[in-house]
Image (cartoon, grey):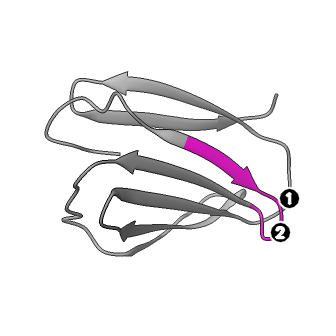
Amino acid sequence: IASDGPIRRYDLFFTDSPSRLVVDLPGNWRNSGGPVFPARDRRIRRVRVGEHADKLRVVIDLKTPISLSPDIEELPRGLSLRLKRP
């Protein structure tokens, strides 16, 4: 998730039905990209981004209900998110 500076506050959670990983970034954000990004990954269907009054929400739609563990790294200009098998 690219940003003009570090992202230090975020909340993430999984949903089961449908299978998704949700990342909420609290605060006032403006998405300069599109609302939907297709993924070329065997586990991820697409990534969706939604602007809300109090947060930016990134939803990663998963292809199957598999158990994954998010690995998050705070970067100087955003966040790196990788999904690993636990």
Picture residue at 85% right of the left edge, 43% below the top: 67
The furthest residue to the left: 4
Q: Nearer the viewer, mark 2 or mark 1?
A: 2
Query: Does 72 sit left or right of 15 as displayed?
Result: left
Q: CA distance from mark 2 to mark 1?
A: 8 Å
Residue identifier under label 1 = 65
Picture residue at 52% right of the left edge, 40% below the top: 11
Is 64 located above or below residue 86 in the figure? Answer: below
The image position of residue 23, as x and y in percent, is 51, 49
Specify the amino acid type for callout 2.
Ser
The local secondary structure at tag 1 comes to loop
The local secondary structure at tag 2 comes to loop
Q: Which mark is residue 17?
A: 2
Residue bounds of the magenta highlight: 12-19
The image position of residue 37, as x and y in percent, is 43, 70
Q: Nearer the viewer, residue 75 or 22?
A: 22
Picture residue at 19% right of the left edge, 62% below the top: 30
Is 54 located above or below residue 7 in the figure? Answer: below
Specify the amino acid type for callout 1.
Pro
Query: Does 54 sit left or right of 14 as displayed?
Result: left
Classify 10 Å Cα crowding around label 1: few (below 14), some (14-19), many (20 and above).
few
Is 35 located above or below residue 53 in the figure? Answer: below
Is 53 located above or below residue 72 in the figure? Answer: below
State the image quarter where residue 35 is shown: bottom left
